[in-house]
Image (spheres, grey):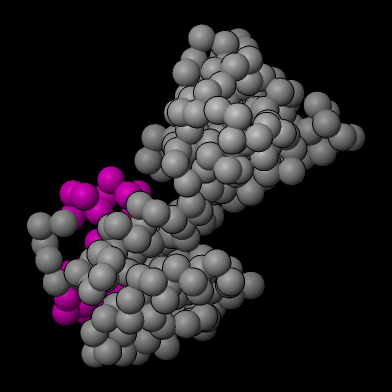
């Protein structure tokens, strides 16, 4: 299946360079190209995208502000003329950070890095169903050891850049996979995304308020953009808070 990609850059010439480089990859399909973040955000709500080539300095909304507001961003390769944003770029767990003008050799390495990450993630998270409910389980890879974790054991999941820590009642498993990947596996199994860095099991929430949910001794923040979904998962009227 082809990798679906999106190009976001306000410079037509820069978009043309990316498109020319992508002509060398038979398994990458360009879904669209956008010259601003507002247009890209609308497209991401309507279409599935696996990989986004993103500029930083754009009118109205910068690339980083755009990424910060996305709930489930695709993988991102930054392409920019500004070297000084590199460290911040990796805070957003980007695949790679490329400086303009981008040579094909450097572009190829970045795309190949994306491929390797995809292959790793395919192995890292494997959801199996023996029956329904608590009989569903995940296989998670930690230090070359495969752990079988039943969904009914999971209290909450915490994100650390490209890693997640899965907290159960007895242990915590750290594995290399983005939180968006595991969210896809759990969204119909009684879990809710409450923050860009947290997914929780609704059944283990013992208390909550407008800004946090409480699971055991852990206080987990509710992100501003997730509040409506959290209250819906809890079947609670947010106007009563």
Magenta stretch, residue numbers: 86-110
Among the 4 quarters of the image, the one containing residue 22: bottom left
Going 63% across and 20% down the picture, which residue do you hit?
Answer: 205
Residue 34 in view (yes/no): yes
Quadrant location, the N terminus: bottom right
Q: Is residue 204 left or right of residue 25?
A: right
| Position of 150 relative to 36 (above/below) | above
Asked if residue 79 is positioned above or below residue 148 in the image, the reply reads below
Q: Give the image location of residue 112, x and y in percent.
A: 40, 65
Residue at 67 percent of width and 39 percent of height: 232
Say whether residue 91 is magenta. Answer: yes
Write the residue at 61% across / 43% down: 229
Q: Residue at x 27, y 89 (%)?
A: 12
State which quadrant residue 228 falls in.
Answer: top right
Where does the image place residue 108, in percent across and percent down from the top left? Answer: 33, 73
In the image, 103 versus 196, the foreground residue is: 196
| Residue 46 included in the magenta stretch of the image | no
């Amino acid at each position: 299946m082809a990798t679906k990609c999106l190009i976001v850059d306000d410079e037509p010439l820069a978009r043309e360079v990316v498109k020319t480089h992508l002509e060398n990859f038979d398994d990458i399909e360009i879904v669209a190209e956008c010259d601003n973040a507002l247009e890209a955000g609308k497209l991401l709500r309507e279409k599935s995208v696996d990989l986004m080539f993103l500029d930083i300095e754009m009118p109205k909304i910068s690339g980083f502000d755009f990424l910060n507001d996305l709930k489930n961003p695709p993988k991102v390769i930054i392409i920019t003329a500004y070297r000084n944003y590199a460290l911040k770029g990796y805070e957003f767990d980007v695949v790679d950070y490329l400086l303009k003008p981008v040579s094909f050799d450097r572009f190829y390495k970045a795309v190949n890095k994306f491929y390797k990450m995809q292959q790793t993630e395919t192995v890292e998270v494997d959801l199996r169903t023996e029956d329904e409910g608590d009989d569903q389980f995940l296989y998670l890879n930690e230090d070359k050891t495969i752990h079988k974790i039943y969904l009914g054991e999971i209290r909450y999941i915490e994100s650390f850049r490209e890693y997640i820590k899965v907290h159960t009642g007895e242990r915590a498993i750290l594995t290399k996979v983005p939180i968006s990947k595991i969210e896809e596996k759990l969204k119909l199994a009684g879990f809710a995304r409450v923050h860009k860095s947290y997914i929780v099991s609704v059944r283990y929430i013992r208390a909550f308020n407008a800004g946090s949910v409480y699971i055991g001794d852990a206080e987990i923040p509710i992100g501003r953009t997730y509040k409506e979904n959290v209250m819906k998962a809890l079947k609670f009227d947010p106007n009563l808070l």
